[in-house]
Image (tube, rainbow, N blue to C red):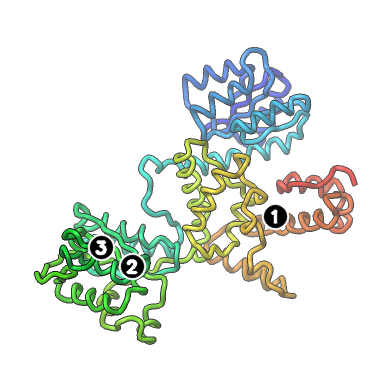
Amino acid sequence: MKPVWIVDDDRSIRWVFEKALSREGMAFQSFASAREALDALAGGEPPQVLVSDIRMPGASGIELLQVVKKKFPSVPVIVMTAYSDLESAVAAFQGGAYEYLPKPFDVDQAVELIRRAFAESQREEAALEPIAEEPEILGQAAAMQEVFRAIGRLSQSSATVLLTGESGTGKELVARALHRHSTRAHKPFVAINTAAMPKDLLESELFGHERGSFTGAQAQRRGRFEQAEGGSLFLDEIGDMPAELQTRLLRVLSDGTFYRVGGHQQLKSNVRVIAATHQNLEARVREGLFREDLYHRLNVIRIRLPAMRERREDIGPLARHFLARSARQLGVEPKRLSEEVLAHLGKLEFPGNVRQLENLCHWLTVMAPGQVIGVTDLPAEFRGEPEDATAATSDWVAVLAKEVERRLARGETGILDKLSRDFERALIERALERTGGRRTEAANLLGMGRNTISRKIQELGIGGGADEG
């Protein structure tokens, strides 16, 4: 465990931190100047968390911050400042500081802030370790582990695979993983969305055409089956394929032969077909919209991809991955989601699934003002309460019981503490909204003292609330 670094020219401040961190069992190292810390940084590994004053003789805390964020961007830096240095603190915050701690500070508040930064730093390290080689697919949920096992079992097979799942669940990613981990990996992977083009064009795209076979066919063209020879062909949204093309596809799957459009020479195909759909193919067969024999040809091996609401424990790791990737693309420092935001996102339905979460993370990378993202930084459509939380019900205890069951089923621990904090946060936030942010009135509504509500506002990281009133 790496230590917390305390950098301050005031010996009494260093002493206060040393005693407090010792009581918490946290390793620490103290420095009387930014230069001492910079020298230590040059000669060894960085701290887990850095706490630094801004104004010191010699190099300033801002200079130290700049060096640390350039060399070790994942290290949280907490800057300390007197009220008169507020402008400097804001500048430091914009420059990548994790948080700023105004002097004089409450020791317990300072330790809690360090503890939060420490935990987040460890999570960031865990999330960033595999970035050297970007993972194909992320997923800790049991349903995703089943998908990974299926990919592994199919690594030595060329069987046709049908991927089902809602839009945005990552069907093409799984198709690419199936190809990459198969014996065909050294051959082409070709993808086509069968719902994205007209019937006549789709036929030519799939099977190719001969010169002069239709108006505009100036030259012979190889289709996707020929382009994917020896490899894998991914047919996305297969449920929307026109009936005539279903017949041609069935023939390829049955005997491995086809003709180009306008052609007379029979061509052989050695292609593994991976098909995908968000639709219920069984229902489309019953409705006469999809050939039953083709359905059975495609449905040799079926892999169902879970919706985001079925793998809520993956929201945090996925979000960190997408934020890091967006930051690399834009050449900026990755932003971080607060615990409050992670809890909030964990309750949303995400109808667009993983794709919707990825789009959200890219939006936040571009649009969110700070490095640590709060609920108020989310786009309007993500700030609203989740549907199941706003459903009219008089039995909130039943809703609570359902949430407890869901968390127990996921194997969570420490449920009492987590739910208690969420409960208190909800009560205080609603009361503050009702009173226009006046803490005394909110405390009266809730039946608690003003000092108690002020302390809980700090502990729970609740924004807003006037000091007077």
Task: Determine the CA span between mark 1 and mark 2.
Answer: 49 Å
| Residue visible at 64% across and 18% down in the picture | 60
Q: Is mark 2 on a helix, strand or loop?
A: loop
Which image quadrant is residue 274 in? bottom left
**Residue pushed farthest top?**
58
- Label 2: how many residues lie within 10 Å, few (<14), some (14-19) or many (20+)? many
Location of mark 1 (residue): 421
Q: What amino acid is found at the position of numbered circle 1 in the picture? A: Arg
The residue to which callout 3 is attached is: 233
Q: Is residue 229 visible?
A: no
Residue 319, percent across and down?
A: 51, 51
Residue at horizontal 37 percent and vertical 68 percent from the top: 195
> Label 3 crowding class (10 Å Cα cut-off): few <14, some 14-19, many 20+?
many
Which residue type carries mark 2? Thr
**Which residue corresponds to the image point at 15% horizontal and 66% vertical from the top-left?**
269
Could you tell me residue 460's position as x and y percent?
Answer: 71, 48
Q: Earlier in the sequence, mark 3 or mark 1?
A: 3
Pick whichever of labels 1 and 2 is earlier in the sequence: 2
Q: Which amino acid does label 3 sit on?
A: Leu
Q: Is mark 1 on a helix, strand or loop?
A: helix
The tally of labels here is 3
In 3D space, how far apart are the residues under numbered discs 3 and 2 (Cα atoms)? 12 Å
Front-lying residue, 166 or 72: 166
